[in-house]
Image (spheres, rainbow, N blue to C red):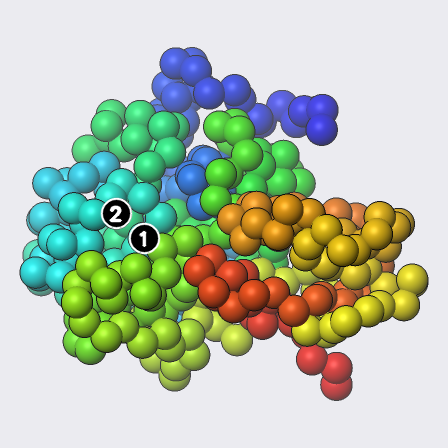
Amino acid sequence: MKNIYLNIFRFNNNSISKAINVLRKNSIVGLPTETVYGLAGNAYSKKSINKIYSTKGRPKKNPLIVHYLNINNAKEDVKFNKDFFILYKKFCPGPITFILKKKRNSKIQPKVTSGLKTVAIRFPKHKVMKTILKKLNFPLAIPSANQSSGISPVTAIDVAEEFAEKIKIIVDGGKSKIGIESTVIDLTGKLKILRPGAISASEISKILKKKVKIITRSKLIKAPGMLKKHYSPNIPMKLNQKNSPKNHAFIVFGKEFKKNQNIFNLSKKSSLNEAASNLYKIFRKIKKLKYKKINVVRIPNKDIGIAINDRLKHAEEKRR
């Protein structure tokens, strides 16, 4: 898609300098990560955090993830534990978010954690994020760069379409490779996955040699992705369907489905990784084509397929 937006800048020294200047002035920028694009602001600045929440229309009870370059940058804000060190060594930088106890003298704004004594932290792998974090003396609070409860963006143009000129700088780092949000694991009590992602509960369980439960719904919202409605194209959706009327969008998976105008294939090769990468792109395409209803085939509930099904369930709109 052609870039017609004046606030999208290709990744280079000039765009990085522009983004850093905006962040140092406690404003916000659109940045790529390996999972999805995010809306970044100074995690220590009340002004930045307020701007993130107001721009997204994000509920106050929904906390943000704080992004750091490495473990040394995070040690002043959070209390590490043994399980964290093991997982950090194995998976970081990468698509995993840790819920840890916040230190009493942390500079993280209370609104970032929704007033909780815990904080969600991540160490992103994307080159743009690492380049920017190296040049800052504060971490970045970054939710996905979309209107609250909507479809997460996987390209710079997605971000521009969401916010237009509300975001002065969006750094284009290409399409997000993974395409869905990070795995969120709570390390503050019994091990729990609060949001499935590319790194599965079984992988984590194997590394830690402990049982890990997946709990994506709770009265206490400790991490992003736990609200009932999320990742939604705001179109009524039915899951686990074998077929679909031609006037409904039909999201499919695998080579057995013939090409048709209303068919949107997550992966003809039956690759769950490719399906995850394509999910939000297909949601946006269906929305632009103004379909009134979406049917989705059954997606294998294994590996990253667990995360895909989690996103589909959150995106599904029940008929009233």
Pick the quarter of the image with the N terminus. top right
Q: The residue tagged with tag 2: helix, strand or loop?
A: helix
Left or right of residue 177: residue 47: left
Quarter of the rendering containing residue 297: bottom right
Q: Amino acid at mark 2?
A: Phe
**Residue drawn at point x = 40 percent, y = 71 percent:** 61
Residue 187 pos. (x, y %): 19, 67
Instruction: Give the CA separation, mark 1 to mark 2.
Output: 7 Å
Q: Nearer the viewer, mark 1 or mark 2?
A: 2
N-terminal-most mark, 1 or 2: 2
Pick the quarter of the image with the C terminus. bottom right
**Residue drawn at point x = 20 percent, y = 47 percent:** 90
Q: Mark 1 Cα within 10 Å, few/some/many (few <14, many 20+)?
A: many
Residue 238 pos. (x, y %): 72, 74
Q: Amino acid at mark 1?
A: Ile
Whether the residues at callouts 1 and 2 have beta carbons within 8 Å, the answer is: yes
Quarter of the rendering containing residue 112: bottom left
**Furthest-front residue in this view:** 256
**Residue drawn at point x = 77 percent, y = 65 percent:** 294
Q: Which residue is identified by label 1? A: 96
Q: The residue tagged with tag 1: helix, strand or loop?
A: strand
Q: Tell me: residue 100, above or below residue 180.
A: below
What label does residue 48 carry, if any?
none
**Residue drawn at point x = 13 percent, y = 54 percent:** 86
Q: Tell me: residue 193, above or below residue 168.
A: below
Left or right of residue 190: residue 177: right
Residue 5 pos. (x, y %): 66, 27
Q: Which residue is identified by label 2? A: 91
Residue 53 pos. (x, y %): 45, 56
